[in-house]
Image (cartoon, rainbow, N blue to C red):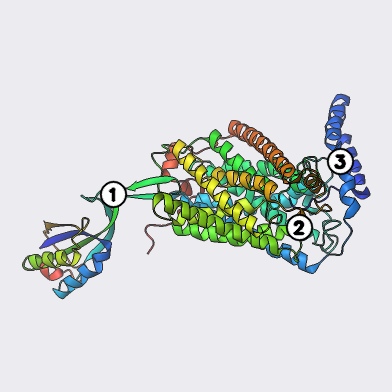
């Protein structure tokens, strides 16, 4: 099993979710995040004060997938979240040792 | 200038003066103290007889009018709504951890000043007991006897609104004026110090200012200076603006200012607040006409000036920075409203548009200068209300129409305009502005210095970092765990 952590544009969350559901990957966690990468920040003005907003809003999508679905899932997320502009985000993959469905006590890929 | 009230020194009022003078002196047993106290009262009373004749000569007694009284009651409700409006306007600018404290600094005054005004504030502003052109008296404490048995007696000769509606209306002004000051002091002042400051400032600065300008006192159309201030350019806006800048100097910047400043946490709050302020300002300026039939002019000029202010601010930003901002639109509208406040019933529509545009321009420049010199008047109270009130008061002198400044209600001002035209009135306005600056600056500084000796004026840097919502009130505006 693998944990996919995708940091993407907030506007692309729905597209990524649909793409994963199409692959029959269900269950994901989304949280609001702020960050910066190569795009750096942007300047905002309020009355006389200028602010360089260093951290821009991003959505952090976490989804755990079985090994055999990993590559398809990564391709789907990449395709759905891409605009081609700076700021599309990043995807990280980490191994997962165990998964448990709390309601039933199921363990392993069946719990996903 | 609101039409001067209570200065007319008719026989019953003079009897009251004597009675109160005697009562006051009766308590002073020591001969030397007694002499000093007498001199003080006499010095204040000296100008009283000068004020007496002029008003009485022309103004005749009228029965109470329902429409005029209704205008005042609706106006009171509208001006009350400006205080929560201001709370939203200011609250939007602060950080999320300080928004409740910022809003409470305004909202709480609907309690504190609401009571204080009835107990003694109104009497000090609009009484005549001390016979002084600088401060009212104590005979109207608890609104004693105001409006007769059923509260509908007319305010004074020449006025057809009921006394009770006038006292309520003026109370709403007393509430919002110290609330305006809070903008310069948010995110660091201790709430206890704020409580005592507002209580004392309202009695020692606001009430005397109202007396001097509107209560037939020294600065107003019945007084020596003869300046006009329709709805509070000096009393409300210059007074709060100057107090704000003095307070910010004494209390100091927020810790880590300017490095720590953040963008406004809720810009929609700012727009909501500005909208409520504009709505309430119709009552603030419009009802200050005190007569329903002629209130159309101040209602109109109020709105046209606000529109011109909003438009001007946004156009300057658009031209200068490339984008018109929502915060700028809200600020420009408020600047236009501040500018027209002293002029609302004294000018026609083209002049009101000019006032709105010029005031917004002046405030825009002031705000930019403040940002450049890094002075922590946190929410620009002086830059908008102080600068805007000053520009408005001076433009009132230049642009007022003699037709709208009738001699029976504005004897000294009309006389000035007749002999030396708008130039003379401008000079009177300038004198009133300078005296207001000096009086309010010194008074505010003394109050803060005395309070500072008795209690900490600001919270500790650690508490500032934690956020004043929790530190001062034990609450948070937005619970992160709510679902």
Number of numbered tags placed on the structure image: 3
Residue B276's image quarter? Answer: bottom right
* CA–CA distance in space, label 3 to label 2: 23 Å
Q: Chain of mark 3?
A: B
Considering the numbered disc 3 on the image, is that residue within a helix, a strand or a loop? Answer: helix
Residue at which label 1 appears:
A41
Considering the numbered disc 1 on the image, is that residue within a helix, a strand or a loop? Answer: loop
Marks 2/1 in contact by CB < 8 Å: the verdict is no
* Residue at 53%, 43% in the rendered image: B184
Q: Chain of mark 1?
A: A
Residue B93 is left or right of residue B359, and the answer is left
Residue B15 x %, y %: 92, 45
Label disc, if present, on residue B48 of the rendered structure: 3
Label disc, if present, on residue B166 of the rendered structure: 2
Query: For the residues carrying marks 3 and 2, which lies nearer the camera in this image?
Result: 3
Q: Is residue B446 above or below residue A95?
A: above
Please report whichever mark, 3 or 2, sits nearer to the chain's N-terminal start: 3
Same chain for labels 3 and 2? Say yes or no: yes
Residue A73 x %, y %: 12, 67
Judge the density around disc 1: few (<14), some (14-19), many (≥20) Cα neighbours within 10 Å: some
* CA–CA distance in space, label 1 to label 3: 65 Å
* Residue at 84%, 27% in the rendered image: B36
Judge the density around disc 2: few (<14), some (14-19), many (≥20) Cα neighbours within 10 Å: many
Residue B65 is left or right of residue B423, and the answer is right
Residue B264 is left or right of residue B123, and the answer is left
> Relative to the observer, which residue lies in front, B222 or B439?
B222
* Residue at 53%, 41% in the rendered image: B190
Marks 1/3 in contact by CB < 8 Å: the verdict is no
């Amino acid at each position: 099993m693998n944990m996919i952590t995708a940091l993407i544009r907030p506007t692309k969350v729905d597209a990524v979710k649909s793409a994963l559901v199409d692959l029959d990957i269900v269950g994901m966690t989304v949280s609001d995040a702020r960050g910066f990468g190569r795009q750096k920040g942007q300047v905002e003005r309020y009355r006389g004060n200028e602010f360089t907003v260093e951290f821009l809003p991003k959505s952090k999508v976490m989804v755990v997938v079985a090994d055999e679905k990993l590559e398809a899932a990564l391709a789907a997320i990449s395709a759905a979240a891409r605009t081609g502009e700076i700021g599309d985000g990043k995807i990280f993959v980490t191994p997962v040792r165990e998964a448990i469905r709390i309601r039933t006590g199921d363990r392993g890929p069946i719990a996903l | 200038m609101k039409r001067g009230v209570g200065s007319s020194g008719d026989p019953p009022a003079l009897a009251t003066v004597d009675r109160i003078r005697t009562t006051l002196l009766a308590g002073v047993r020591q001969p030397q103290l007694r002499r000093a106290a007498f001199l003080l009262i006499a010095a204040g009373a000296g100008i009283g007889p000068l004020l007496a004749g002029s008003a009485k000569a022309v103004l005749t007694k009228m029965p109470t009018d329902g429409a005029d009284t209704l205008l005042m009651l609706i106006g009171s409700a509208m001006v009350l709504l400006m205080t929560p409006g201001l709370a939203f306007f200011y609250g939007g600018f602060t950080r999320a951890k300080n928004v409740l404290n910022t809003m409470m600094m305004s909202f709480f005054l609907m309690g504190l000043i609401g009571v204080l005004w009835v107990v003694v504030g109104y009497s000090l502003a609009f009484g005549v007991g001390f016979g002084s052109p600088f401060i009212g008296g104590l005979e109207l404490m608890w609104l004693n006897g105001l409006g007769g048995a059923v509260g509908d007696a007319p305010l004074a000769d020449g006025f057809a609104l009921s006394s009770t509606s006038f006292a309520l209306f003026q109370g709403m002004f007393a509430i919002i004026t110290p609330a305006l000051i809070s903008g310069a002091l948010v995110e660091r002042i201790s709430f206890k110090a704020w409580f005592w400051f507002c209580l004392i400032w309202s009695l020692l600065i606001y009430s005397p200012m109202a007396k001097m300008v509107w209560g037939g006192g020294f600065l107003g159309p019945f007084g020596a200076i003869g300046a006009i201030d329709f709805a509070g350019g000096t009393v409300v806006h210059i007074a709060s603006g100057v107090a704000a800048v003095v307070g910010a100097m004494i209390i100091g910047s927020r810790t880590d200012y300017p490095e720590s400043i953040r963008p406004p946490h809720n810009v929609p709050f700012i727009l909501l607040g500005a909208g409520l302020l504009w709505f309430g300002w119709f009552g603030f300026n419009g009802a200050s006409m005190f007569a329903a039939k002629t209130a159309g002019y101040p209602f109109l000029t109020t709105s046209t000036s606000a529109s011109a202010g909003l438009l001007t601010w946004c156009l300057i930003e658009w031209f200068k920075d490339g984008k018109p901002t929502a915060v700028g639109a809200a600020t420009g509208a408020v600047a236009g409203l501040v500018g027209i406040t002293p002029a609302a019933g004294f000018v026609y529509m083209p002049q009101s548009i000019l006032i709105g545009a010029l005031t917004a321009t002046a405030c825009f420049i002031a705000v930019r200068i403040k940002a450049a010199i890094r002075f922590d008047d946190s929410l620009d109270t002086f830059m908008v209300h102080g600068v805007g009130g000053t520009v408005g008061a001076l433009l009132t002198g230049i642009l007022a129409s003699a037709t709208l400044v009738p001699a029976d209600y504005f004897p000294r001002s009309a006389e000035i305009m007749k002999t030396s035209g708008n130039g003379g009135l401008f000079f009177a306005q300038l004198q009133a502005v300078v005296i207001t600056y000096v009086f309010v600056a010194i008074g505010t500084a003394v109050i803060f210095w005395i309070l500072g000796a008795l209690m900490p004026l600001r919270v500790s840097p650690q508490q500032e970092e934690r956020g004043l919502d929790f530190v001062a009130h034990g609450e948070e505006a937005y619970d992160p765990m709510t679902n």
